């Protein structure tokens, strides 16, 4: 399974002049697994990053969401772990930090799929569920550990986990970790690691704070940047409706009722908004489910499972899903509310047009959100085409009044001080009593 990434080219695609995976220096066991997964050629970031990582270099990888970042780091790590003799005591040898549970689980799936012939073991730990099964897996011994920061620190504080054997550290979606307030937690984790290690930092955007973090953690890193920072995929047809706030409900129902909407992600700014939108769509006969940080882990898994299986056509999400969901066949992304962080727009719409498919991104922008639209267009250096609101749009009861809009933000610094997540929960530390840790 390819995760959090656009899959490498698959059989049946048009021929592309690319090196093969074996030409990158990957071991036959890994190439065999990739063939079994149906992959034939690496994506640009994989072609450039894998040789450098096989050489043991630190690396900063910057690329659009959906371009193959997970395989770019997972494959060389698996090769390194398979070649090394496993130390006594079976300590964790590789640590991958992820900002969300969903993304952590998908990265773990990738390690399992790509490493099926290597004998390298991996496990995933995150908050929101009991820790007993996770502790048992760690005690059995694990080569690669994928974790969210909160649960990882919980286990470290309980002395149920040691990281003194880690030789490779990966920060995946590093800019998102800053946005969710995980910087303090990341620094604590890094302090528990050996100073001599290989460190990889991957992100789709590279704001100033991430560059500063990279400078403090990496040694003479290779920088791989295969697309313009914060650019959007060419295969995504973008458009925006300039509408009144009271028109959004009817407009959303109209958009999602179109026959070409096979599977759609709808983004709201708040978890309460996600619940309201899902309820409105259900009443309109459009099958929908909501996913956000207030949902239990079981509810989140059921919603995502139904969306992947196609039994739920529309998934309504807060930005917790923007970088944690990799579902093949998302035909449309709809921004019911525009994000106040322009980089977030790039990550949201990157959920469509994956695996070299085409996709559609539609935004509903009311008067109060026009300033956010201008910020997005300034960041992406593209004007999003305007679409006229249909004249026959039926009147619908407007959604309940939303809370005041958040301020504009041009970077990924935490909006709420000490560690608030995008759905208003404590994703890290500080800022009052924290919510469930390790999203």
Image (cartoon, rainbow, N blue to C red):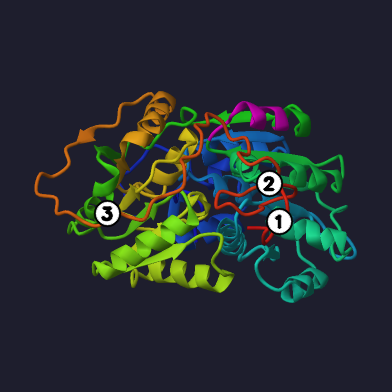
Residue 244's spot in the image, x, y percent?
26, 41
In percent of width and height, residue 99 lies at 62, 51
Per the image, the residue denoted by label 1 is 434
Q: Residues within 10 Å of mark 3 (few under 14, many from 20)?
A: many
Q: Check disc 1: other Cα within 10 Å, few if <14, some if 14-19, many if 20+.
A: some
Q: Secondary structure at mark 1?
A: loop
Q: Position of residue 172 (x, y in %)?
A: 62, 46
If you read the primary sequence from the N terminus, does the residue marked by circle 3 or circle 1 appear first? 3
Question: Which residue is located at x 71 percent, y 35 percent?
Answer: 58
Q: CA distance from mark 1 to mark 2?
A: 8 Å
Q: Which residues are magenta?
A: 205-213
Residue 61 vs 323, above or below: the answer is above
Mark on residue 419?
A: 2
- State the residue in front, 249 or 387: 249
Residue 79 seen in render: no
Label 3 residue SS? helix
Q: Which residue is mark 3?
A: 249
Left or right: 219, with 400 as reference point: right
Say if mark 1 contacts mark 2, CB within 8 Å.
yes
Of labels 2 and 3, earlier in sequence is: 3
| Disc 3 to disc 1, C-alpha distance | 33 Å
Q: In this orientation, does residue 263 appear?
A: yes
């Amino acid at each position: 399974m390819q995760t959090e990434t656009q899959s490498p080219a698959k059989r049946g695609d048009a021929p592309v002049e690319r090196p093969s995976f074996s030409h990158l220096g990957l071991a036959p066991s890994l190439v065999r697994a990739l063939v079994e997964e149906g992959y034939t050629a690496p994506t640009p970031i994989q072609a450039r990053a894998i040789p450098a990582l096989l050489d043991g270099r630190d690396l900063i990888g910057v690329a659009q969401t959906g371009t193959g970042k997970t395989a770019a780091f997972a494959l060389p790590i698996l090769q390194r772990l398979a070649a090394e003799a496993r130390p006594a005591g079976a300590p964790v040898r590789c640590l991958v930090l992820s900002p969300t549970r969903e993304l952590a689980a998908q990265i773990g799936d990738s390690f399992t799929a790509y490493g099926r012939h290597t004998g390298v073991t991996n496990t995933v730990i995150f908050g929101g569920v009991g820790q007993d099964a996770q502790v048992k897996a760690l005690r059995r011994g694990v080569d690669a550990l994928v974790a969210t920061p909160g649960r990882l620190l919980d286990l470290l504080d309980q002395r149920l986990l040691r990281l003194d054997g880690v030789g490779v550290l990966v920060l995946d979606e590093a800019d998102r970790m800053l946005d969710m307030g995980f910087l303090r937690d990341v620094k604590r984790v890094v302090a528990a690691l050996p100073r001599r290690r290989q460190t990889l930092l991957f992100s789709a955007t590279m704001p100033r704070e991430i560059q500063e973090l990279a400078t403090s953690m990496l040694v003479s890193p290779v920088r791989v940047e295969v697309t313009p920072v914060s650019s959007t995929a060419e295969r995504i047809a973008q458009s925006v409706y300039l509408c009144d706030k009271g028109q959004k409900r009817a407009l959303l129902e109209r958009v999602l009722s179109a026959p070409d909407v096979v599977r759609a992600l709808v983004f709201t700014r708040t978890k309460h908004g996600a619940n309201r939108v899902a309820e409105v769509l259900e009443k309109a006969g459009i099958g929908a489910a909501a996913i956000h940080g207030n949902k239990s882990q079981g509810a989140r898994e059921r919603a995502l499972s139904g969306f992947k299986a196609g039994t739920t056509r529309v998934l309504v999400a807060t930005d917790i899903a923007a970088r944690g969901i990799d579902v093949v066949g998302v035909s449309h992304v709809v921004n019911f509310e525009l994000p106040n962080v322009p980089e977030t727009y790039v990550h949201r719409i990157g959920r469509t047009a994956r695996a070299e498919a085409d996709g559609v991104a539609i935004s509903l922008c009311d008067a109060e959100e026009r300033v956010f639209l201008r910020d997005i267009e300034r960041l992406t250096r593209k004007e999003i085409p305007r679409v006229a609101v249909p004249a026959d749009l039926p009147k619908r009861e407007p959604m309940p009044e939303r809370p005041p809009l958040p301020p504009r933000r041009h970077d990924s610094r935490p909006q709420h001080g000490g560690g608030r997540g995008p759905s208003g929960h404590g994703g890290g530390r500080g800022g009052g009593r924290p919510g469930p840790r390790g999203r």
